[in-house]
Each structure stands twice: as structure tokens, then as C-alpha cells.
Amino acid sequence: MAKTKDFFKAICQVSKAFGTTLSREKLLDLIVASAVDSMDAKAACLFMEDRQNDIFIPVAQKGLSKKYLHAKPISAKTIVAAVLKGGHLYIKDCTTDSRVENHAEKKAEGLSSILDVPVTVKDRVIGILALYTNEIRKFTKKEIEFLSALADQGGMAIEHARLVDRLQKNALLFLDLASDINSSLDIKKILGNLTDDISKALGLKGAAIRLLDRESGELKLAASCGLSEEFLNKGPIAPTKSAVQALKGEMVVIPDVTTDKRVQYKDAMKKEGIVSMIVSPIKSRDQIIGTLRLYSAVPREFPEDVQIMVQALAHQGALAIENASMYLRLQADKESLEQDIWSHRSWF
């Protein structure tokens, strides 16, 4: 009963911390410290998934040496599959069990048993909370439930920090783009900055803006970043199913470019290392004039808030094109007027 009370107190302490101004790092430190203290363990570590490299990276820990943390990275797919199979993973002796790696490093660190539970956000595993003991030990159902509850708190802290970070990046993107539009009429520069900024902000492989050639029906490249010349010059981009949808004003999300029938040049996508993509229409007044394509090197789902932000940025790009077009028309009209006035002056 005393241990249960400790668990309840620890959960309350972590929950209360969410209402404070603590940073994500301090919240995660509190979570791993609560796990060690409440379960009388040697150490605890919260690992975050690096999807691109298929490894786990420690983001918060208590009780582990720097030497151990800098050992070989943990394979993400192997450990996630094992954890998801039973909702948790219990390793009786981590120095010999074939399901875990780095046996020698674990033995040198003085580790014995491990309890791993998933850190999830919206039903997707984004990390692992691992608890370590210095002697062989079994874990009760209550202990497993408690560690899982702490892992859920960790997922909440990480997701909250991500949302705040995304809001800040979105605001900066709009500010930078508005500044570009106000300070320059160089369309290539503005659209080039847009593709570069949005790729960095969303952690994407690259982006491309293509504008519709009304005569040929092709989508011609106007700006890009992060993509090879070979990929960009793979061939004419006719309005395929994904492009047709975008040119009708629809947002197109493609989680897997290698299997989706709407994707053109699948082999080129695979060679370029593209896994997922999103296509947004670029609309100027009542006309769709092109598409903004964003490419990801890892599987991405692109939630609704990201789609709205991408669409808004594409709209800003259209405004930049419209402003430059109006300026060019005004310049042409001005030159025509000057020539006309000069011809009339010749009569005097």
C-alpha cells in the first residue's frame, strides 16, 4: 500500500508540473527521476525515436554514466516491435538476453533487469521509457502500469513542446515570407526562400514549386530546394492524378509514394529517397496557377494543422507572384504611355 501511495504521489507531482513554466527538458528529467525514486531502481532513461536513422536517442536520464549513453545506438524497429507485442518489454537479464543489444556495455554499467514501456502520441510510438535495476528483479502489474503512466506523461510533454515549437516556426515562416514580398519583386528569390524555409521548418527532405504552363499543360519548375538535378529533370510533369487534384484546389497527402497510383515517376522518387509527400494548390485570385510539393524522407501523415499552414504559405506565394505580375504590367503601361506622350510631343 505504501508503494501505491508513492506511485500516486509521483503521478500527481508530474501532472502538477505541466501547469508550471517548466521546460520540456525539465519535465522529462522529472519523469525519469520519478521512475527511479518511486520504483527504487538503479536508473531510467527516456529515448526518442530518430525515424530517419532508425535509432533511439536518449533525451532524459537518471543514474546512467555518459560512457554508457554514448555506446552504440539502439535499433528502433526491433525494440518497438518487441514492446508493442505485449504492451511492455521485460528483460530479466539484459547482459545475456538476445532481444537487447550492447551486452558488454550493460554488464560494465552494472545493469541487470530492464522494463521498457512505449511513449506514444496519437497511437504512434515515438519513444521508449526504460527502467533499469542493478539486480535481477520481477515487476508487478502495478509497477508496469505506473511506468506506463509516466511514459504517457512524457508523450504529453513532448507533444506539447512540439506544438509550441511548430506554432513559433509557423509564425516566423509567415513573417519571413511577408518580409520577402514587401522588400523584393524577385519572384525566383521569394519562391526559393519559401521552399527552403518550409523544408527546414517541417524537417523535410525538400520542396518544389511548379507553375502551370497554359499552352503545354505542363507544370514547369519555378523554385526548389533539397532535391537533386537528376530528380528535378526527370521528365515533363504533366498533370497526373495528384496534380489534377491540386489543380482543382484540393490538398493531396500521399503517405507512401512507392505504392500510390497518383504518383508519377515512382522509381525516381525511390532513388531520391522520398517516402511521403504533400501537394498544395497555388491559387491566385480565382485561378490555380501551380502546385507546392513537399517531400519527406521518412513516413509522414501531415496532420490537419500542417496542411492548413502549407496551404496558407502557398497562398502567400501566389500573392508574391501576383504582386510581381502587376508591377511588370504597370512598368509596361508606363513605358507605353511615355512613348505615346513623346510621339505627341513631336507635333509641337
Image: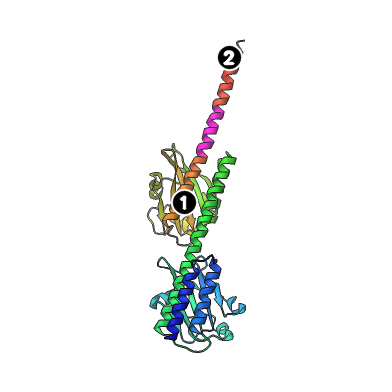
Query: Range of the magenta residues?
Result: 321-332
Q: Which numbered disc, 1 or 2, marks the residue that appears first in the sequence?
A: 1
Q: Position of residue 221 (x, y in %)?
A: 51, 45
The numbered dot on residue 309 is 1
- Tell me, yes or no, whether the two marked residues, 1 and 2, touch with CB atoms within 8 Å: no
Q: Position of residue 224 (x, y in %)?
A: 53, 49
Find numbered disc 2 in the image and state the secondary structure of the residue it sits on: helix
Q: Residues within 10 Å of mark 1 (few under 14, many from 20)?
A: some
Find numbered disc 1 in the image and state the secondary structure of the residue it sits on: helix
Q: Amino acid at mark 1?
A: Met
State whether residue 241 is above or below residue 110. above
**Which image quarter holds the C terminus?**
top right
Q: CA distance from mark 1 to mark 2?
A: 53 Å
Most distant residue in the bottom direction: 136
State whether residue 46 is above or below residue 293. below
Q: How is the image coloured?
A: rainbow
Left or right, 194 with reference to 348: left
Nearest to the observer: residue 341 or residue 175: 175
Q: Amino acid at mark 2?
A: His
Most distant residue in the top direction: 348
- Which residue is identified by label 2? 344
Residue 250 forms part of the magenta stretch: no
